[in-house]
Image: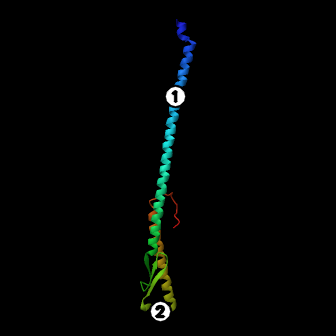
Amino acid sequence: DAVRKDNKNPTQAMWGEQRLECRRESMLSIAAVELTEQEDSEEEKVKGSISDLMKQAQNMQADIQKAQEDLAKAEVRGEAGAGMVSVVMTGRHDVKSVSVDDSVLSEDKEVLEDLLAAAVNDAVRKVEARNKDTMSGLASGLDLPPGFKMPF
């Protein structure tokens, strides 16, 4: 009997191996289904992320276009000579008006030209600063890599 317990019936051994093989295949099938479900779920997440990103980009594009229109209409005042010469300029760098104090008219032509140039340059710097601040404020909501510069 001791010998018989150690030596299983060949038919029983074969059935045992087949059951183990069947269990192993079932477990592999279950694992494959779970993996496929995970991949499908991840694929849906990626599609959702891309869709969200596209919506976000469209919204940002509309915001940028609106900001550019508002900036083009905005007016700034550049001054020189303690306000004796001033220039009103739009966000598109169009000069809308120039104001010169009467006291400057008694100066040499070169002084007036220098004051006009300085007032225009002051207005240009203010327009550029306003544009940069406004546009960088719009880009602050993005998760951009460090050092990335927007083209505006």
Against 41, residue 81 (above or below) is below
Q: Residue 134, percent across and down?
A: 44, 68
Q: Which residue is drawn at 49% across and 44% down?
A: 42
Amino acid at the residue labelled 1: Ser
Q: Which of 1 and 149 is in front in this view?
A: 1
The answer to whether residue 133 is visible is: no
Numbered-mark total: 2
Scheme of image coloration = rainbow
The answer to whether residue 48 is visible is: yes
Q: Which of 55 and 152 is in front in this view?
A: 55
Q: Residue at x 55, y 16 (%)?
A: 13
Q: Which of 141 and 112 is in front in this view?
A: 141
Marks 1/2 in contact by CB < 8 Å: the verdict is no
Against 39, residue 107 (above or below) is below
Amino acid at the residue labelled 2: Glu
SS label for mark 2: loop
Q: Mark 1 points at which residue?
A: 26
Against 140, residue 46 (above or below) is above
Q: Residue 54, percent across and down?
A: 49, 56
Q: Residue at x 50, y 92 (%)?
A: 108
- Residue sitting at the far bottom: 106
CA gap, disc 1 and disc 2? 99 Å
Name the mark on residue 107: 2
> Which comes sooner in the sequence, label 1 or label 2?
1
SS label for mark 1: helix
Q: Nearer the viewer, residue 110 or 1?
A: 1
Q: Residue 91, percent across and down?
A: 47, 75
